[in-house]
């Protein structure tokens, strides 16, 4: 794909609606993510956060509206987009090393026979260094903790040199050390101009990692600067009108 000026938005969502068959899942989501910016997708389970990420990846069709990725349709930008799923399909019992997992992120840049060059291995080493796991490169992936495995999956995405990075609940169940490492790595990516979209339930993560927030629950309830969008009123509306209490950076939702 032809390189575009840095000023080109990494992602444009223009009144995006998605449905599975006749069942609407998302309606009228609008917003822009620029290079070096990050947006948190926040909403309850089943709100459509994962569906929106899949639509940006071109994995589910948009029934109305428009998604533009790096100046064109999603299919044309796949080489420049990386994705860290909520649950990876890698079997922890499979005998594969940490280094080999991260090397998968280089496949799109490698030749037909996927022979790693010195440059590819340097990218892998740099990605592992970015997530604080350079000393675990030769270890078997399955021997790592859950948080460490999540850091390896982020390193795999970093090795792909993405211009847009999509993450689906990457902080779920990770320890404090891994959370800090993930946040540091994301900050480094943004400093290099990578745009980041991260789905999360954690308001603290949204404040720490993201300049903007998209509140969704099948419909959009806000898209803009974190401090302006994360208000009790908007959160209460997003979570279905149920009683909502803010306690520090936690959201506690109960029945009305």
Image (spheres, rainbow, N blue to C red):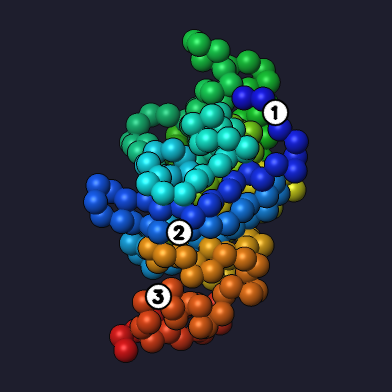
Whole-percent x, y for residue 221 in the image: 48, 70
- Separation (CA) of disc 3 from disc 1: 40 Å
Q: What residue would you read off at disc 3?
A: 239
Between disc 3 and disc 1, the foreground one is 1
Left or right side of 90 for 125: right
Q: Quadrant of the N terminus?
A: top right
Q: Is residue 231 visible?
A: yes
Residue at 65%, 74% (x, y): give it: 227
For the C terminus, give its image quadrant.
bottom left
Q: What secondary structure is marked by label 2?
A: strand
Q: Position of residue 231 (x, y in %)?
A: 56, 80
Mark 2 vs mark 1: in front: 2
Task: Decide which of 151, 93 is in the foreground and name it.
Answer: 151
Instruction: Return the disc, 2 or 1, that comes first in the chain's sequence.
Output: 1
Residue at the spot 65% in from the left edge and 67% down from the top edge: 225
Q: Residue 135 is drawn in which quadrant? A: top right
Which mark is on residue 3? 1
Q: Is residue 146 above or below residue 200?
A: above
User: Within 10 angstroms of label 3, few (less than 14), some, or many (20 or more) residues?
Assistant: many
Mark positioned earlier in the residue sequence (3 or 1): 1
**Which label was assigned to residue 85?**
none
Mark 2 lies on residue? 28
Q: Residues within 10 Å of mark 2 (few under 14, many from 20)?
A: some
């Amino acid at each position: 794909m032809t390189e575009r000026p840095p000023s080109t938005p990494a992602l444009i969502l223009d009144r995006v609606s998605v449905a599975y068959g006749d069942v609407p899942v998302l309606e009228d989501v609008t917003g822009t993510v620029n290079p070096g910016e990050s947006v948190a997708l926040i909403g309850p389970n089943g709100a459509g956060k994962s569906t929106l990420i899949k639509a940006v990846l071109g994995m589910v069709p948009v029934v109305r509206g428009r998604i533009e990725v790096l100046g064109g349709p999603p299919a044309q930008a796949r080489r420049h987009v990386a994705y860290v799923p909520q649950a990876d399909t890698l079997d922890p019992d499979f005998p594969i090393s940490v280094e080999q997992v991260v090397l998968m992120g280089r496949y799109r840049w490698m030749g037909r026979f996927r022979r790693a060059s010195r440059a590819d291995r340097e990218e892998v080493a740099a990605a592992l260094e970015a997530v604080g796991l350079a000393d675990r490169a030769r270890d078997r992936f399955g021997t790592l903790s859950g948080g460490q495995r999540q850091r390896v999956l982020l390193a795999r995405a970093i090795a792909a040199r993405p211009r847009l990075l999509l993450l689906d609940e990457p902080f779920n169940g990770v320890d404090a050390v891994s959370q800090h490492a993930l946040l540091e790595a994301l900050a480094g990516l943004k400093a290099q101009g990578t745009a980041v979209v991260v789905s999360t339930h954690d308001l603290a993560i949204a404040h720490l990692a993201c300049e903007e927030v998209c509140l969704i629950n099948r419909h959009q309830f806000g898209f803009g600067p974190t401090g302006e969008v994360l208000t009790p009123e908007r959160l209460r509306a997003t979570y279905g009108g149920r009683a909502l209490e803010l306690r520090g950076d936690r959201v506690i939702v109960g029945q009305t």
